[in-house]
Image (cartoon, helix red, strand yellow):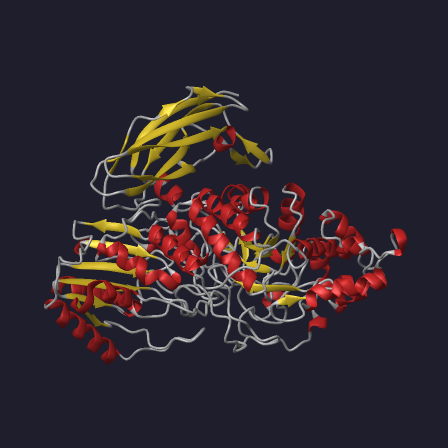
Amino acid sequence: MKRLLLPALLLFALGPTGARGQQTAPLYLQQDAPIEERVEDALQRLTLEEKVALCHAQSKFSSPGVARLGIPELKMSDGPHGVRAEIEWNSWRHAGWTNDSITAFPALTALAATWNPRMAALYGRAIGEEARYRGKDVLLGPGVNIYRTPLNGRNFEYMGEDPCLAGAMAVPYIRALQKNGVAACVKHFALNNQEQWRTSVDVVVSERALRELYLPAFHRAVVDGGVWSIMGSYNRYLGQHCCHNSALLNDILRGEWGFDGCVISDWGGTHDTREAALNGLDIEMGTHTDGLTTESRSGYDAYYLAQPYLELLRSGELPLETVDEKARRILRLIFRTAMNPRRPWGSLCSEEHYAAAKAIGDESIVLLRNNGILPLETDRYERILVVGDNATRRLTDGGGSSELKTKRTISPLEALKTLYGDKIRYAQGYTCGNPLYGKVEEVPAATMDSLRSEAVALARTADVVIYVGGLNKNAYQDCESTDRRSYDLPFGQNELIEALAEANPNLVVVNITGNAYAMPWVDRVPAILHASYLGSMGGLSIADVLSGRVNPSGKLPYSIPVRLSDCAAHASGDASNYPGIKPEGISMKKAPDAPADSRAYPQVTYAEDILVGYRWHDTRRIPALFPFGHGLSYTTFSYGRPEVSAAKMGPGERLEIRVPVTNEGSRDGMEVVQLYVGDDKCSVLRPLKELKHFRKLFIEAGGSAEAEFTLTEDDLKFFDEQSHGWVAEEGTFTLYIGSSSTDIRQKVKFRYTD
C-alpha cells in the first residue's frame, strides 16, 4: 500500500494544476505516458546529488531510487537458476527469513542440453514469476559465456561452447522473464571464461574470435531478446576492466548494437572513477568486496561512482553529460520494472513451477552410452543397489552466487525408492568430506577405502548397480571463484567405478556435473547418463529416464574430450593459454588496481582463436570422446533426403531447407536435427563446419515429421579483420545435417554468388 500512496501524495507537491483546478500527476508519474517522455521529465527534476546516487549501490543487492520524487529503488537478486535467499542489507550473511524458499530450476547448462527454445521460454516465465513474487526488479542472469575449457568452475551457469545454441536459448528466456516486469541481466560481458585470477586476468584474443564466438550470444540477447540490463565481467580486455571497458561498452554494446539498457558491474568489478564515468558503466555494485565473502570496510559513499564521482563532476573534471546519460538509462530501467504498473504479481513454489523444472530436467538428461541395459523397467530387477554421494547430496547448495534455498528438493535416491520400492539399497561409496568455500578438507584414506569396500561388496550381490556421482558445487569443482584442479572426477570416483564394474557388469553410471570429465572406465560401463544440476525435481527426472517413463532427448551443449590435452585451450600445454602467465614479483592482491599500462596482472592468450569445442575437434581431426550435440534415445531416428529450394543463393536471398525424419522405433521420442554449414574453400581459416540452426521434433513411434530451416547470407559470413566487417565469399558451401556434430546423416552442396 505504501508504494501506491506515495505518488498520490506527490500530486500536491509536484503536480501542475489542470482544468477546473484539478491536480494532474507529473509526467514521470503518468503510467500511460511513453517511457522516454517520463524518463526525460524525471531527469530534469533530479539534483546532481540524486543523479549520482542512482549510479551506485545502497546495500548488497539494491541501488537507490529518489524518495523525494516517489521513484523507488531497484532490488536485485542472484540467479539465474532460482531467486537467491535474502541477504542482509550490508553483509553477505543470510537474512534468516522464513518466506524466501524457492523453486530451484535446472542449471543453464541443463537448459542448453534440452536444445529446445520452448523450454527456455517456460524457464524464463517461471523464474520471472518467482522473482516478481519476491519483489525483485533485476534477476542477475542468464549467463551466456562460451565454454572454452572444462576446468572453468562456472561453466554450469552458462550454455555451452557454441554461440548459436547459447543465443537461441537465451532469447526466449529473456523475453519470457521480462514479461513479468523483471529485468534480465545477461552476464558476464565479456570473455569471462575462467575463474582463476578472474578479477585481474587480461584476455588476449583476436577480434575475429571475439566477434564470431564470444559476442554473438550477447548480441542476440540485446537485438533479438531486448534485454534491459547487462552485467560486466571481472576480467580485462585490451588492458581495461570489462565493467568499464570502452571498446566493449561504448563502441560495441551501445555504438554498434544500440543497447538502451543499464550496464551493471559485477560485484567488486569496478576499479576506477574516470573509466567508470566515461566507459559505459551505469550502476556500480559490490565495490570493496570480492563479490562473495569479503565485507565492505567502506561505506557506499566511497564507491567510485559515489562521492569521488560527485567531486569530479562538481569540479568540472568530468562532464555532466556522463551522469545524465547514466541517470537516463537507470530511470528507464526503473520505469520498465519497479514503476511498471502492469507487471503481474507473480507466484512462488507453485505446482506449475515444479512441473516446469521437471519438464526442463527431463529433456536435459543426455544418454551418452547404452548397450541395451536401459531402460530399467520396474519389474526387471529385484535387487537394485544405488551408490554415490550425489544420490543424496543437496546440489542446490554451494557454487557461490548460484546457491539456492529450496522449499522442496527430491534427490535421486528418494525418487528411485519411490519408483522401485524396497528393491533399493544404498551405499555412499565415497565422500567429499565437508568442503567449505575456498577450502577443501582432506578425507582420510581409511574412510574412503571403507566406503569403497562396502559399496563393492554390496554390488556383488545386486542384480544391477546405479552409480550416481560426478562433481558438486563445492570449491574447485563447479563453483564460482575457483576453477577445477583436474579433468578427472574427484574423491577417487574413477577407482570406485572401476571396482564396481569389476564386481557387477550391470552397472549404470549417472554423473551429475556442469562440466566434461575424463572417463577412463568408459568401455567397461554398459550405460552412461550425463546430467547437470537439475534443481528441485532433479531426482524425479533421473529416475524417470532410468526407468523409461521418460525417453531421453538431451544433447551435449559441449564436447567431452578424451583427455584434457585434446581440448583446444590445453592442447599446447602452454600456461599462457590457460590459466595465463602472472608477471614475476607481482602481488596479485595489488594487481586489480594497477594502472592499465603497468602489465602488473596475469595475461591469458586464446591461441586456439576461432577453433573452440567441436570446431577444434573437427578441424584438427582430434575426435572427442562424446561430441557436441551427441545424445541417444530409447528409439531410433532416420533422416530422409533434404529438400533445398535452390542450388545457389546470392546476397539478400534465402535457402529453404526441409528435412524429413522418421521414428523407426516402438517408443515416442524427440530428436534434435542440427544444421551445420561449412565453407568448402575460403581465403582464411574456417572451421570444417559451424552450427547455424537446429530444431527439436517430437515424433510418435512409427511416425514422421519435418525439420524446416531458412538459411540466409548471414549464416555464411566470417568476420574479416582487415575490412573490420562480416564477409561471405563466393564459392561452394556444404550443409551438414545430423544428430550431432559428428553423426552427419545428410550433406547438400550449394553455391553462393556475390
Residue 160 shown left or right of residue 543 in the figure? right
Classify the position of the N terminus by image quarter: bottom right
Residue 727 shown left or right of residue 656 in the figure? right
Residue 115 shown left or right of residue 459 in the figure? right
Q: Is residue 156 visible?
A: no
Residue at x 23%, y 50% (from the top left corner): 369
- Closer to the camera, 91 or 579? 91
Q: Is residue 404 visible?
A: yes
The relative height of residue 535 versus residue 749 in the rendered view (above or below) is below
Q: Residue furthest left?
A: 461
The relative height of residue 269 versus residue 257 in the rendered view (above or below) is below
Residue 398, percent from left and from top: 43, 70
Residue at x 49%, y 29% (from the top left corner): 712
Residue 168, percent from left and from top: 47, 43
Q: Quadrant of residue 739?
A: top left
The relative height of residue 69 versus residue 676 in the rendered view (above or below) is below
Q: Quadrant of residue 506?
A: bottom left
